[in-house]
Structures are given as C-alpha cells and as structure tokens.
Amino acid sequence: MKKKLFVAFISILMIAVSLTSCNKKFTKPMNGVLDFVFKSEVPEKVNEIAEEFGFDEKYEILLDEKQDGVEVYSITGFTDGTSSEGYGIVIRKDGVWSAFPEICHGKNPLARYDKKSNSLWLTGGVMEGTGVFVEKLYHIKFNEDGKAYIAEDIDPYLMQKALCEKFGYSIKDESITFYAGERELCVRENKEKDMGGFDKDAIWIGEQLFYDISGDDIYVYFVPGVKFVTGLVLHYENMPTLMARITIDKDGHFTVSDENSVVWPFEGSYLDEDYGEPNLDISYRRNDGKYNVQIGIPRLTTLDDGIAVMGDNGLEFTATDAAGNPIGGEIVLKGDTAVVTFISTTWPLIEQGTSFKYVKKAENQ
C-alpha cells in the first residue's frame, strides 16, 4: 500500500521548539552513514521509452491526472525476463514524454503534481537491503515545450546529516531517551539482553528514511536503528518513527524545521477487515510507555479497557471480557494491517488462537 496512505493514518503532535540550546553534556548527537546506493541495472532501456508509451513492459502508474495533462509511470520490469525494481520514471506532460532512468523505482514510489507551480514532486529509492529503505526526494519542472527536467533533489547523505544535528539521545542503564534539543521525545528499553548492551555510539539514523509528499507541506520520516556492543546489524524493531517538516527554497536548498514529533508504532484507529467499521483503537501513553487498546469484534463484543505493552512480536494486551474475566493476547502489525490474536481466554465465544484483522483508517475515512 502506498506510503502516503500510511502517513495519512498517523496521529502526530507538532510542537515548535528551539534546538539551539541543546545541552551536549547530557545528550549525544545521533550518528549515521549510508552504506551503499541503489543503482538501476538497465537504465538504457528506460531511455528508449520516449516516443510512445505503447510498449509491453511492466510498470506502475504513479499519477494519472488527465485534466492537467500529467502522467507518471514507474518502470518495474521488461519483457526480456529481466526482473528487478529500480528501473526508472517516465513522465508524460501534454503529450511530451521524458524518461529518468536515474530515479529508481524503490519500494514505495510516490508522485504529486503541483498545479500552481506546474511541477512534480517524486520520491525514488536510493538504498535497499534487509530491513533497510532510503528514499530520495525529487522536484521536477517543465520547459516551455513540456519536456521535464530535475530542478532540485535532496541528497540522502545531506538529509541524514541535517537530521543527526536536530536529534540526540542519552543512555541510562538499559534505556535510551531521545531528544529534540532539550525536549524529551520518548524512551525505549533494551529488550535485546543477549547483545551485550548499547554501543557507545548506539543510535544511528538515515538507514530508514522516507518522505510524505501528499500535501502542500513535505515531511521526512526516519526510524532510528539501535547498535549493540555485539552484532553489527542495526535493530529497528519496536522503535518509534521520528518526523520533521522540511522546506525547500527557490535555489533548491532545504531546511529541517524545528517542528518535530514522534510517530508511535501501532498508534491509530483501524477498521475491521470484514465490515469496514472502526473497531480497533490504539493510543500511546507517554507517562508510562504503555498503550490503551479498545477492541471491537463485529456483531460480538467490545473490549474497551485494554492495556498493552510492547513485546517481542508486537503489543501484548490484557482486557476484561463480557463475563468480567481477564482476556489477553497480542497485536502484530503487518504493514497497515493489525492482526489481533487471543492467546489467554476463558470466554466461550472467543477461543484461544482466534484472530481478527483490522486495517489502519485513513484520515479522510
């Protein structure tokens, strides 16, 4: 599902803060280095697609706004059997075709046409790996003859550096506290007891980096990775998503705003899969790090007093069933779908192992 749907579901708190007074004595700046850049394997094939979009290739339609004469296609494969993502973007504006093999398809390509400025915003993948995803932001403009060209883009290395300067962290025992300046954003406990504790430079960002271009304001989202003393792989499980608004001036220079917030995993409203009704609501309790959970099972019951904590696989919740007895289970998030499984139950209408699926609710639903 498109990431712009994902970000539209998130309930966020925007607070303006001054980040210039951060006390470096107690807060370490974040670190981060991108390991490699994702490259297109056959960009020359994309360049051949310039005269007519009548070929039999694999593609995804990113944008089709006929009233404005704008179409955007992302090439995902070719008829010669070559199979991979990351081939390039093809744009048609008022009948004129333009190909951009350097803009890789990535996992979640997005496009938005700004009618006022007669320009396009695009996101493309620049790095992929096991649990790792990094995007690059492009601003596309058009010549008088309708030919498209890249007016600005944001280097992920530079964005990573700017974000590292905005956010910090401190470590105490087995917990990490995240900061924006002197403002505490959130606390995370170390659940990886076999990894030897936190590395001295434990928090890295930039290896999970993506954008929301769905509205007039552009936001960058990034997931910190925790590094431990033993083991070189960054761990992203159960980590919050940090968010900041960015602005880009007429010369293409970007600025990371002092407005920022935390997007908590699982938090939000969900519709049950069968009836499309709002039957799951999860909210984060900042004071104790737990979650309030309300679970509605269509045509059966509602559990409105659930309390959950983050476990190894997802949220572990307990509530009170219709007979007044304890009932519990886990909530696992798979993309935009929350799977609620009852593990501990004495109520005859809900057997142990019963699962229900809920899809995250869009803001306009």
Image (cartoon, rainbow, N blue to C red):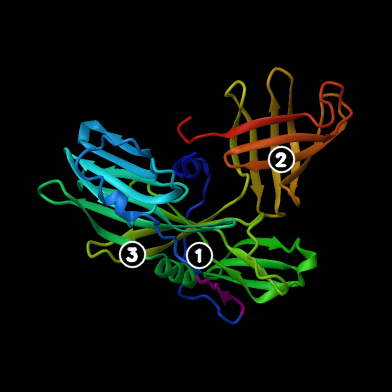
Q: Are marks 2 and 1 in contact (CB under 8 Å)?
A: no
- Return the residue at label 3: 254
Tell me residue 318's x, y (percent).
80, 39
Q: Secondary structure at mark 1?
A: loop
Q: What's the amino acid at mark 2? A: Ile
Give neighbour class at mark 1: few <14, some 14-19, many 20+ (Cα, 10 Å): many
Please give the name of the residue rendered at 69% of the width and 34% of the height, measured from the top-left corner.
294
List the residue tagged with mark 2: 331
Of the image marks 1 and 3, the number of the one nearer the N terminus: 1
Residue 28 falls within the magenta-colored stretch:
yes
Between 287 and 42, the residue placed more toward the observer is: 42
Label 2 element class: strand
| Alpha carbon distance from label 2 to label 1 | 28 Å
Q: Are marks 1 and 3 in contact (CB under 8 Å)?
A: no
- Three-letter code, disc 3: Phe
Can you identify the residue that label 1 sits on?
206
- Residue located at (81% from left, 32% from top): 353
Start-end of magenta stretch: 26-33
